[in-house]
Amino acid sequence: MFIGEYRHTIDTKKRVAIPARFRKDMGQRVVVTRGLDSCLFIYPLKEWETLAESLSKLPTGKAETRSFVRLMLAGALDLDVDSLGRILLADYLRAYAALGKKVVIAGVYNRLEVWDEGKWAEYKNKAEQSSESIAEKLGDLGVY
């Protein structure tokens, strides 16, 4: 399980380190793809295979479904984690998430998210201000 937030820097060779705490569970190969809310998702290979299988079973008759599946699958990269725990972020992925030099890597249960540091601060602030109404909605669903 991945939880917590960690600040990192994208180096001059466009690499970012996976937080040391997560490296063992991430393994030597990961999949990075476009995420939601203008961030990147990083999945352990086994978790990605489960997600990709689910996505492949969605009906292709709806434009929204096709678009989402394309966003997730066509934009994905299968990457090796180097000996120092770093991965190379492709230009198109960095551009999609508008990543600057400083990033936040957030553990979100079964995946990591990579956020531009400024965007993460904005997103987190907005979510914190809405936490009570979010909790109410989750309560209605029986989740919280």
Image (spheres, rainbow, N blue to C red):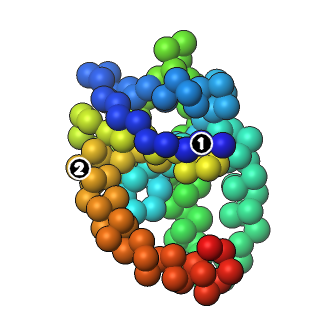
**Residue at the image position 67 percent from the left and 31 percent from the top:** 25
Residue 128 percent location from the top left of the image = 36, 65
In the picture, measured across the screen, residue 105 lies left or right of residue 10, that is right
Q: Is residue 104 left or right of residue 20?
A: left
Q: Residue 142, relative to residue 122: is it above or below?
A: below
Give amino acid for label 1: Phe
Q: Report the number of numbered marks.
A: 2
Tag 2, which secondary structure?
A: helix
* Number of residues whose C-alpha sits closer than 10 Å to that of mark 1, classed few (under 14), some (14–19) or many (20 or more): some
Residue of label 2: 118
State the image coordinates of residue 88 (x, y, percent, origin top left): 43, 28
Farthest residue, direction bottom? 140
Using residue 112 as the reference point, say whether residue 52 is left or right of it.
right
| Relative to 17, residue 103 above or below | below
Quadrant where the image shows the C terminus: bottom right
Q: Which quarter shows the N terminus?
A: top right
Q: CA distance from mark 1 to mark 2?
A: 22 Å
Vertical relation: 43 (above or below) 66: above
The x and y percentages for residue 92 are 36, 45
| The label number, if any, that marks residue 2 in the structure image | 1
Contact (CB < 8 A) between labels 1 and 2? no
| Front position in the image: 141 or 23 | 141
Residue 7 seen in the current view = yes
Quadrant assignment, res 104 = top left
Mark 2 residue type: Gly
Give the quadrant of residue 37: bottom left
- Classify 97 as above or below 140: above
Q: Earlier in the sequence, mark 1 or mark 2?
A: 1
